[in-house]
Image (cartoon, rainbow, N blue to C red):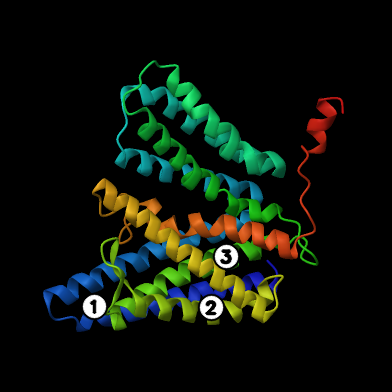
Amino acid sequence: MDPETKRLLGLVGGILVIASIIGFILSRRARSEAAKATIANLNARIRSWWVMAAIFSATILLGPTFTTVLFALLSFLAMREFITLTRTDRADHEVLFWAFFIILPLHYLLVGIGWYGMFTIFIPVYAFAFIPFRRVLTGETKNFLANTSRIQWALLICVYAVSHMPMILALPLRDYEGENAKLLFFFVLTVQLSDVLQYVWGKTCGKRPVAPRVSPHKTWEGTVGGIGTTVLISSLLWWATPFSPWQAGLMALLICLAGFFGGLVLSAIKRDLGAKDWGGSIAGHGGFLDRIDSLCFAAPLFFHITGFCFGTGMDPRPPAWILEWLGR
């Protein structure tokens, strides 16, 4: 680990220690049942954050292969939650087999070998076309459009969008060679800080809901306070990125806004499905998709804008060994 990575890990550890101390103090002072329930939920969230931060940090330190495998597993679990809450028919089962066990692994294989050109079009083009082709072969036309669209959405959000995070490790950037793990850390830390700080600001100052029918607990005070605080903190972390301080602030603002609207979109889908959470796998947070909803929408924007503004250009061609195998 270089000194900058150590500082990032120390920052996360320090935040979690402070949060744990505050949670302990609040649990001792809570008197009403409502306050006790709120604090219990907060402490459950903090304990889950310790586990998630440890797993993510360890995986980043182990290298790109482990990071890719982690996000592939996360995509699998998130897509499982998405499909579980949506309606599927018997005719969809074979299509879902292809989605989970063929398309998802192939896509992350593209991430692992760094084939940028195929990575960008495999799901939006080939998988998008394959899903209805495979579905129509079942001969079942009932709910064809709705069920096909749900599977396409699941792949787009849970696999394609999420996979942009490990792909950050392969992004060639000017004067930043071999340091992309810190950029991925910066991105994930910014999104999660924004979520946490919006929650804190909303609980302490929130009064006016942004979209009461979609997400009644998201308030203007929480949103502005959380995003503003996150942008300030992320600007101070510019030294871990290829950005200057003001560029880090702008990128953080972009990440936070994309994450905010991503969370609203996933909340709207949950409301449409009549569900409060995507699952109950993570104590205090809900399901895996509840925790990464902001990341899903922010990751592609961050990846492509960073590559466009600060990159040296990714080669869309297959890796050299594939070209040799093809005799080209």
Furthest residue to the left? 32
Identify which amino acid the numbered label 1 is placed on: Ser
Question: Which secondary structure, mark 3?
Answer: helix
Q: Identify residue for label 3.
A: 187
How far apart are the two marked residues, 1 and 3, measured between alpha carbons?
31 Å
Q: Position of residue 249 (x, y in %)?
A: 60, 77
Which picture quadrant has residue 122? top right
Residue 180 as seen in the image, left or right of residue 126:
right
Question: Residue visible at 70% across and 73% down?
Answer: 243
Q: Nearer the N terminus, badge 3 or badge 2?
A: 3
Q: Position of residue 11 (x, y in %)?
A: 54, 76
Question: Which secondary structure, mark 2?
Answer: helix
Identify which amino acid the numbered label 2 is placed on: Val
Question: Residue visible at 56% across and 69% down?
Answer: 254
Question: Residue visible at 53% across and 34% down?
Answer: 128
Instruction: For the residues labelled 1 and 3, say whether their Cβ atoms are less than 8 Å apart.
Output: no
Q: Position of residue 269 (x, y in %)?
A: 34, 50
User: Which mark is on residue 231?
Assistant: 2
How far apart are the two marked residues, 2 and 1, measured between alpha carbons?
30 Å
Q: Nearer the viewer, mark 3 or mark 2?
A: 2
Residue 258 as seen in the image, left or right of residue 180:
left
Dot 1: within a 10 Å radius of its alpha carbon, few (fewer than 14), some, or many (20 or more) residues?
Answer: some
> Which quadrant is the C terminus positioned in?
top right
Q: Identify residue for label 1.
A: 27
Q: Nearer the N terminus, badge 2 or badge 1?
A: 1
Identify which amino acid the numbered label 3 is placed on: Phe
Instruction: For the residues labelled 2 and 1, say whether their Cβ atoms are less than 8 Å apart.
Output: no
Establish if 190 lies above or below 85.
below
Establish if 247 lies above or below 87.
below
Question: Residue visible at 76% across and 57% down?
Answer: 172
Question: Which secondary structure, mark 1?
Answer: helix
In this rendered view, identify the residue nearer to me: 191 or 6: 191
